[in-house]
Image (spheres, rainbow, N blue to C red):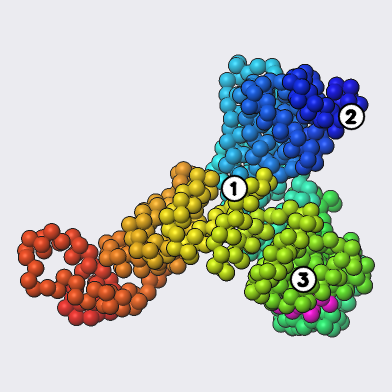
Amino acid sequence: MLRALKERRTDDAWMQLQTLKGEGIEPSRECLSRLVAQLSHHGTPSSLSKAQRILSDLRKQDKIRQLDSDSLGLLAMASARAGAARYALRIVRLMLELDLYPPVKIWSAIVSRLGRQPDDGLLALELFDDICLYFRAPDAVELSMNTMRPDTGAFNAVLNACATLGLMDRANTILGLMPRFGVVADTLTFNVLIKLYARTEQMELLKGVFGRMEEAGVEPDQSTLNSLVAAYVGLGDLEAAESLVERFWKMPQENVQAHHEKCESSSSHSQTENSVVEYRGISLKSERHRMLKFWSPERQEERARSEDAGSVASERRWGDRLRPDVRTYTTLMKGYVQEGQVGDAIDFLLAMEQKFDPNVSPNEVTYTTAIAACVRLNLMDEAHSILREMGLRKVPANIVTYNILLSGYCRSRNMEKAYALVADMKLAGISLDVVSYNTLINGCIKSGDNVAALAHFQQMREAGIAPSEVSYTTLMKAFGQSGQPRLVHQVFEEMQADPRMRPDSVAWNVLIDSICRSDRMADAKSAFKRMKEARLHPTVVTYTMLVKGFARAGMWGEALVLWNEIKERTEAKIGSGLEPLQPDEVLLDCLVDTCVRAGYFQRALEIVACMEDNRILADKTKYKRMFIELYSDLYTSQHTSQRRRDKSEEKRDAVEAFKFWVGLPNKYYSSDWSP
């Protein structure tokens, strides 16, 4: 076995291990460690499964020390790369329990993987905190721990987790730890901070990034510029994005006038404020002629005067290296599409084709953005014409381009053209991916063809493509809408059994919804409990489905228990240990409806107050009519004893307050009134 491992014959070594196990012979520590290391290095699903099996067997036998730190570290890294970041996390924690200190390269890679997903971000922060605890007392740090000491890459990874979760205060705390570990920020640190500022909508901090980089002696790179433009676009501030691009945009002075004249004479541009862009048969309104503004001589002179005044000193110093590239301009195009300014996006594409910037030509992402703009407006023929234009210009369309077109056809329920596009993809040598199959499954469901949706799911598996969360949840939705809760539960169980998958809140919501629709509220309550045990926060949709289900079943008390939980989360602050919740009109309306029908008027008024706090208008006419229909003779008997009146005084007050709120006669007003 050792000879096979030294000769890199991993499969033979694995077979020999099985033989030795069958004979009751225990391999040496070196053999097991080498085998796990080589299986991890291969990184295929089958080899990782074998390595994980060895680890599992050793843990059951309490012989985990038969593996050395290198083999465990390699298995953790390989598992993280394969998408099993949580499994990798368990290995790292096991290493820490065994005092086998994982090198920073290994544990920071796992922090990086965990930090990319919102559901796993807190785990990344916990691992980083646990590692830092080993260094809280410098005198107690062992020499073997030094390889575990956080470096700049580790700090960048955990800051990215903060950015993913939008934890501004936590990020500031982590930044404050960097000097303690002798770590300084680099360009990537600031790029991650841009993501954080964008996520937390810190516009002023975004505008001060270049200044902070200059103070720290860190130079921005192309990704910094593009990240800032993307941040402004994401926050809907297109003017800030345009201004930033303009500051770094340069055109040879001798070409400025030529481009200006070309633009003026183009039939696609005019001097009017509002005009029509003509592109490949597409006629769209372009409101502001952004490209004309960029290359106009007047703007060039204004920029030159500004630079002479020294107002953009740092940008001027970096300007020789930093220039807008095709990604920068494409990001701006995406901003126009998001804001519904599709004409401006197409105008931008036309300008790029006319070489307004000699160093930039539209690529597949640029054309894909234009296609997405047309799909957004349901201009499917026009979108297809842009696809043909890509072929004429020798710009190869990729799977993303085809998937966007496919989603447009499926969204409009034109499955005939969707299948024709799939045939074109195969002719172009492009294989369908998981997104393609998910889109087809969703299109079939919208068209009411659940049989075809299931067939596509099976085709995806037969093609060796692993289903994604969307694959499972989309299929679950199909079965749920067709009233087949048993099949919904079956698909959910398959998702749970898939080692790559971790059911997210959407999957749990679909499961709970199907159970509620079948009026099995005890099972729905159990699923809700399991969802929280899986460390997933119930969403507004989760609560709404459960409230409706409890109301149909007459389980008023369970609905009130949910309201107490919802109330706590609506009042919670970020960092309080309780996930804040922003309720919507549908959820609160369902709660008020349930309370009124159950006669819980005091609770109904509590929920109304919550609606007012969240600036949600309550439908008083609806509740007024409901009260009249259900409780017109409530507390109107003249023969009720004083003892019973005293006993129900609190309830009577709540009823009177509710009647006052909806405008019915009450003890305050003797006739109808308009509040």
Placement of 455 over or under 133, stated as above or below: below
Q: Does residue 546 show up magenta in the picture?
A: no
Name the amino acid type tagged 3: Leu
Real-space Cα separation, disc 2 to disc 1, in angstroms = 38 Å
User: CB under 8 Å between callouts 1 and 3?
Assistant: no
Q: Residue at x 51, y 58 (%)?
A: 512
Name the amino acid type tagged 2: Arg
Q: Quadrant of residue 275?
A: bottom right
Taking the image as shown, residue 524 lies to the left or right of residue 68, namely left
Q: Residue at x 90, y 66 (%)?
A: 428
Point out the tag, 1 or 3, that comes first from the N-terminus: 1
**Residue 51 x %, y %:** 75, 33
Q: Quadrant of the C terminus?
A: bottom left
Q: Quadrant of the N terminus?
A: top right
- The residue lying toward the viewer, choosing from 532 and 199, is 532
Taking the image as shown, residue 374 lies to the left or right of residue 649, namely right
Describe the element under mark 2 as helix, strand or loop.
loop
Real-space Cα separation, disc 1 to disc 3, in angstroms = 30 Å
- Numbered badge on residue 8: 2
Describe the element under mark 3 as helix, strand or loop.
helix
For the stretch drawn in magenta, what is the main secondary structure?
A: helix
**Residue 511 x %, y %:** 54, 58
- Specify few, some or many for label 3: CA neighbours under 10 Å numbering under 14, 14-19, or 20 or more: many
Real-space Cα separation, disc 3 to disc 2, in angstroms = 46 Å
Nearer to us of marks 3 and 2 is 2
Placement of 353 over or under 498, stated as above or below: below
Q: Which residues are magenta?
A: 377-385
Residue under pointer 3: 405
Residue under pointer 1: 119
